[in-house]
Image (spheres, rainbow, N blue to C red):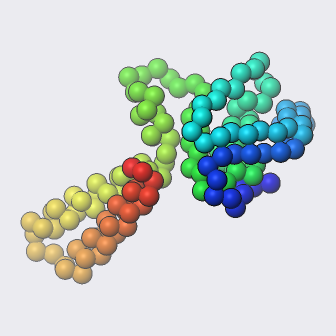
Amino acid sequence: EGASETNSGDISLQGFSISVAGKVLLENADLKIAAGRRYGFVGPNGQGKSTLLMHIAHKKLAVPRNLDILLVEQEVEGSNTTPLEIVLAADTERVSLLKRKDELEALLEAEGAAAGSEADAMERHEELEEVYRRLSARGS
């Protein structure tokens, strides 16, 4: 079905069905998720909870395009990593932008100490400004 064009923060799905390997998990189902509210999916294993969340996250259902949705795996190996760090690490675009920001800042700092091409420095500054803009747009 794919993402919808609405700019709403809510998810409203009517009459959708999900099957996996020939097994119908959800048939002619309706779902309403209001922005800002908290929800829990409860039910026996194998009934489609995780599959539904994967379909929402990958926008295989009519989810508004403007929503950024991160899906964290059900089971994570034990570590000292906080839940917040796990969720932030799942945002691969954010991680990539932060890495590029650090690289560009280091290059510009090194170039400041050495005589380099002004054109290269200007290009790096422009790219860094774009990285800052994209991070800001993501709320990072």
Q: Quadrant of the N terminus?
A: bottom right
Q: How many marks?
A: 0
- Left or right of 50 on screen, residue 24: right
- Left or right of 1 on screen, residue 130: left
Residue lying furthest bottom in this view? 119
- Left or right of 111 on screen, residue 6: right
Report if residue 18 is visible in the image: no
* Residue 8 image point, x, y percent: 64, 53
* Residue 121 image point, x, y percent: 22, 74
* Residue 97 image point, x, y percent: 40, 55
Tell me the residue at 69%/26% (across/down).
Answer: 41
| Foreground residue among 131 and 109 | 131
Quarter of image, res 116? bottom left
Quarter of image, res 7? bottom right
* Residue 44 image point, x, y percent: 77, 18
| Foreground residue among 33 and 49 | 33
| Foreground residue among 34 and 64 | 34
Tell me the residue at 78%/24% (across/down).
Answer: 46
As drawn, 69 above or below 85: below
Tell me the residue at 57%/39% (across/down).
Answer: 36
As drawn, 45 above or below 3: above
Report if residue 58 is visible in the image: yes
